[in-house]
Image (spheres, rainbow, N blue to C red):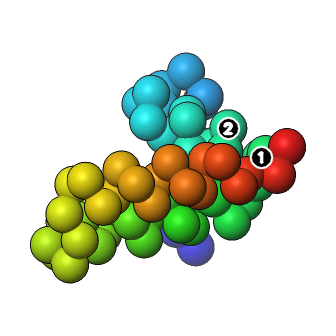
């Protein structure tokens, strides 16, 4: 049987945006999925940067704390 090669990341090893997504996830899991979708839509040029910022601002206003 092979030894499991999975390595766990510590919180300190995460990038700042990854830490932010984790913080958001703990506060409101739905906001993370919305943020990921917005990033993808902007990268695929379905929406422009201004629309991305607008939708992100709307999402942040509606977050449940």
3D distance between C-alphas at marks 2 and 1: 5 Å
Could you tell whether 52 is left or right of 42 in the image?
right
Q: Residue 55 appears in which quarter of the rendering?
A: bottom left
Residue at 73% x, 52% y is: 63
Frontmost residue, 40 versus 18: 40
Which structural element holds mark 2?
A: helix
Residue at 56% x, 67% y is: 33
Task: Provide residue 27's location: percent of width, then percent of height.
Answer: 79, 45
User: Which of the numbered marks, if any, corresponds to residue 23?
Assistant: 2
Q: Residue 62 appears in which quarter of the rendering?
A: bottom right
User: Which of the numbered marks, if any, corresponds to residue 26?
Assistant: 1
Can you say whether 59 is above or below 1 in the image?
A: above
Q: Is residue 47 visible?
A: yes
Frontmost residue, 27 versus 13: 27
Q: Dots 2 and 1: beta carbons under 8 Å?
A: yes
Can you say whether 1 is above or below 51 in the image?
A: below
User: Which of the numbered marks, if any, corresponds to residue 8?
Assistant: none
Task: Provide residue 45's location: percent of width, then percent of height.
Answer: 14, 72
Could you tell whether 45 is left or right of 52 in the image?
left
């Amino acid at each position: 049987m092979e030894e499991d090669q999975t390595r766990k990341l510590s919180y300190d090893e995460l990038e700042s945006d990854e830490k932010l997504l984790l913080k958001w996830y703990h506060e409101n899991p739905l906001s993370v999925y919305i943020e990921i979708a917005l990033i993808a839509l902007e990268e695929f040029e379905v929406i422009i940067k201004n629309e991305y910022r607008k939708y992100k601002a709307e999402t942040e206003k509606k977050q449940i704390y």
